[in-house]
Amino acid sequence: MSILITNIKELVQVRDSNVTIVKGSDMKQLPTLKNAYLFIDHDTIVEFGKMEDLSGIHADETIDATGKTVLPTWCDSHTHIVYAGDRTQEFVDRINGLSYEDIANRGGGILNSAEKLQNSSEDELYLQASNRLKKVIKLGTGAIEIKSGYGLTVEAELKMLRVIKRLKQDFPIKVKPTLLAAHAIPKVYKDNKKGFIDLVVNEMIPAVSKEQLADYIDVFCEKGYFDLEDTKRVLEAGIQNGLTPKIHVNQFNAFGGVALGVEHKALSVDHLEELVPEDIKALKNSKTIPVALPACSYFLSIPYTPARQLIDAGLPLALATDYNPGSTPSGNMNFVVSAACIKMKMTPEEAINAATINGAYAMDISNMYGSICRGKKANIIITKEIPSYHYLAYAFGDNHIETVIINGQIY
């Protein structure tokens, strides 16, 4: 099937060459074409240009985008959408004065989700996760990373990853699976953290590798969870089993996790609400991309990732949702883009670059996703009639998306 989109008010994130990452001051540049067309054949972007240059293209379907903006779908590189139930009570507890750490110390938080997940069947988890995935696709997400981490046993972590595999097979969007075995210390290992890490390293990681259920290995490197030595051990075991590192780091404390991630050639270091000069120094001249999760900061009322420090230091930055039941029960990348502009002082251009090309880079798929480029996958957002792409970040309370195209098919 072929689709021709005509009379596009503004075609956003157009690249004649295949740019795969945008850094520093270049993030302020967002190339666009006004009064444009876009031609899609099967699942591929074949051609684009100005309407005055359109000739000789015949498509199975033509979409008139008069007054509308067209851009690549969002690339959400950090989610936890496979989970059971919700944690609404903890939301109320925080309003009543308990901190995230207080709730975790009482057996809530990740351990709460782990208990619910362990008591849920694979089919129940799949149904809940597929409903969430359908919603985020309609909100414009065209590629997504999904982590395990609410299992905390060999059996339950494998169950989560098998659900992710089913989602990958059943849905048209790009899905990248991550093993986040070291997400929290289970109750049965409360006084034996080393024993749990032994389980992760000697049983979980090899089992996941054997079934080829994950691309990445992740660790929650944070005080009260996993320290630098723990993180190093898990990452190295993952690497030995063919998994590329990613890290949850600097959410509440900065103590060297960023440098450790860079040392182990992590694809991304995610959260970074706390940042010290040594972290920026470690990231320079590396291939590791920082990932900010502003919806998490909004929901937990914690600091926002200091985007200006990172970008002004010449570094790249990606944006993702952190969609999960405890700290970000939303997969709305449109809100993430708005929050980045409003709370992190990113320009709309920087935020869109961070949520498209750089989000794709943080999943190692920016060679095929994240921009309007000939030969890339036809994952496209068509907005409703809006004044400009700036309006996407400005009018944060409305849904501006009219049509989502995934792999050349209207979703």
Image (cartoon, grey):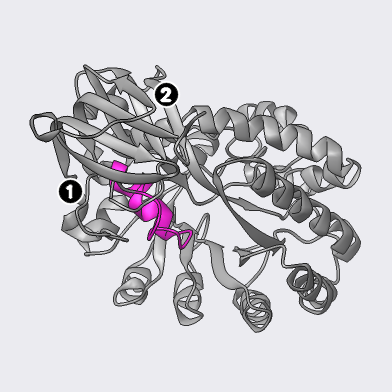
For the residues carrying marks 1 and 2, which lies nearer the camera in this image? 2
> Toward which corner of the image does residue 228 lie, by quadrant?
bottom right
Which residue is rendered at x = 66% and y = 68% of the image?
Answer: 226
Which residue is rendered at x = 45% and y = 44% of the image?
Answer: 43
Would residue 360 be counted in the magenta stretch? yes
> Toward which corner of the image does residue 128 lie, by quadrant?
top right
Q: Is residue 347 visible?
A: no
Residue type at mark 2: give it: Thr
Direction from residue 204 to residue 235 in the image, left or right? left
Direction from residue 410 to residue 224 in the image, left or right? right
Nearer to me, 100 or 373: 373
In the rendered image, residue 215, in percent from the top left (x then y), is placed at 61, 65
Which residue is rendered at x = 61% and y = 27% of the image?
Answer: 95
Q: Secondary structure at mark 2?
A: strand
Mark 1–mark 2 Cα distance, whole angstroms, equals 26 Å
Nearer to me, 392 or 324: 392
Q: The N terminus lies in which quarter of the figure? A: top left
Q: Secondary structure at mark 1?
A: helix
302 above or below 284? above
Which residue is rendered at x = 17% and y = 31% of the image?
Answer: 36
Upstream in sequence: badge 1 or badge 2:
1
In the rendered image, residue 108, in percent from the top left (x then y), is placed at 77, 43
Q: Is residue 164 visible?
A: yes
Q: For mark 2, does the 10 Å Cα neighbourhood hold few (<14), some (14 to 19), or many (20 or more) residues? A: some
Q: For mark 1, does the 10 Å Cα neighbourhood hold few (<14), some (14 to 19), or many (20 or more) residues? A: some
Q: Which residue is mark 1?
A: 28
Would residue 325 be counted in the magenta stretch? no
Q: Which residue is mark 2?
A: 403
In the rendered image, residue 385, in percent from the top left (x then y), is placed at 27, 15
Residue type at mark 1: give it: Lys
Task: Identify the magenta region.
Answer: 351-370
Direction from residue 408 to residue 162 in the image, left or right? right
